[in-house]
Amino acid sequence: MLDPELLERITLRRAELDELEERLVKQLTEVRAERDERAVAERVLERMTGELAEKRASGGPVPRQVSGRAVTLIPHREPGVEESRCHGTTSASSPPGETWNEVDLRRCSRTACAS
């Protein structure tokens, strides 16, 4: 005949093991999800690093962080710049990749080069 005390101990240990298994399965799922997120973040970082390197090499404007948002810094309008540079156009004397900022475009829209 089965010993009731021994049977109870076995049953309790199986319940403990079932509970441990549930916790480990949950933890494994969380670890896999975080690992997948890290892999995606790594790919994004590699792609962005490559894009920034290309932009730097081409001499174009490079995005910066301002208030947590990526923006492209645009040089301010220099005194004596002709109006033909309105609406993002550049002249032969302007640095590569230089464009107008919004204030310059608003000023320009009030002048003869308004479209």
Image (cartoon, rainbow, N blue to C red):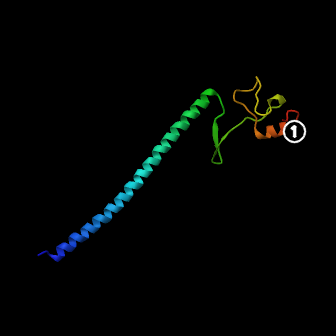
- Binning the other alpha carbons within 10 Å of mark 1 as few (below 14), some (14 to 19) or many (20 upward) gives few
Q: Residue at x 60, y 27 (%)?
A: 57
Residue 38 is at least partly visible in this image? yes
Q: Residue at x 54, y 33 (%)?
A: 50
Estimate the x, y position of residue 106 in percent, counting from the top left.
82, 40
* Residue at the left extreme, as displayed: 1
Q: Count numbered badges in the picture.
A: 1
Q: Which amino acid type is shown beneath numbered disc 1?
A: Arg
Per the image, the residue denoted by label 1 is 110
Name the secondary structure under disc 1: loop
Residue 71 vs residue 11: left or right? right
Estimate the x, y position of residue 99 in percent, counting from the top left.
74, 33
Relative to 63, does residue 11 appear above or below in the rendering? below
Residue 99 vs residue 29: left or right? right
* Residue at the right extreme, as displayed: 112
Estimate the x, y position of residue 26 in percent, counting from the top left.
38, 59
Estimate the x, y position of residue 75 in percent, counting from the top left.
73, 35
Which residue is nearer to you in this view: 61 or 110?
A: 110
